[in-house]
Image (spheres, helix red, strand yellow):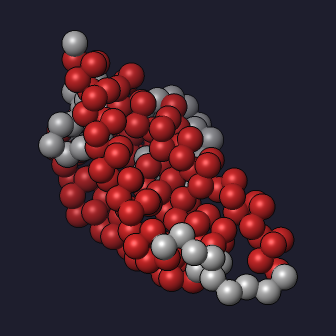
Amino acid sequence: MRKISAAAGSSLFFAVAPGVVAGVVPWALTGWRAGHADGAWWLVRGPAAVMPAAAGAVLVHAFGRFVADGSGTPAPVAPTAHLVVGGLYRYVRNPMYLAVVAVVVGQAALLWRPVLLGYAAGLCVLFAAFVRGYEERTLSRQFGAEYDEYKASVPAWLPRRPAAKP
């Protein structure tokens, strides 16, 4: 039963948080209309279309790990019972934030809209401040030495191969 409620909560949070940040806000900024571009835009557009799709797959995987590993949600109001360290979380501590920014950067390139690059930069600042100011402190209090060891073993923002299982 706990996994079912965790799956439902994660699905709801997925629709609300990344759905708004990487869907509603970029739509409000652009109306999904492409900006004016010269011929170079066509060289970027194909690869750019892959970025939001790949980042979306990362988001789905990362959210799924909360159900599989933590029996909870990534939402602060319904946290996990266990620290989530499997899957992509073995390579980087913040794959969700990175994926959301990648979706927006991909949209910027796909639509050729610089306003989305500015928005992505703002998201980077906001996410970094939230992680440092709230998330890391909260996880350290909740999971103690387990989180401190994980934090020392896995980078926050630049993915790398794990040296050993955290």
From the viewer's perspective, is residue 119 above or below residue 136?
A: below
Where does the image place residue 158, in percent across and percent down from the top left? Answer: 55, 56
- The answer to which of 128 and 38 lies nearer the viewer is 38
**Residue plotted at (63% across, 82% down):** 35
164 relative position to 29: left or right: right
Residue drawn at 42 percent across, 30 percent down: 65
Q: Position of residue 53 (x, y in %)?
A: 61, 49
Residue 112 visible in the shown view: yes
Please tell me which residue lies in front, 34 or 155. Answer: 34
The percent coordinates of residue 33 (x first, y second) are 57, 75
Give the quadrant of the C terminus. Answer: top left
Residue drawn at x 51%, y 53% is 99
In this rendering, is residue 94 above or below 6? below
Give the image quarter of residue 74.
Answer: top left
Establish if 69 lies above or below 91.
Answer: above
Q: Is residue 37 left or right of residue 164?
A: right
Of residue 152 and residue 40, the one placed in the foreground of this image is: 40
**Count of numbered circles in the view:** 0
* Quadrant of the rendered image containing residue 57: top right
Whole-percent x, y for residue 68 in the image: 39, 22
Classify residue 134 as left or right of residue 24: left
> Quick one: 76 or 56, which is closer to the camera?
56
**Is residue 155 in view?**
no
In the displayed structure, 128 sits above or below 7; it is below
* Quadrant (top left/top right/bottom left/bottom right) for the N terminus: top left
In the image, 145: left or right of 113?
left
Q: Residue furthest top?
A: 1
- The residue depicted at 59 percent of the width and 55 percent of the height is 52
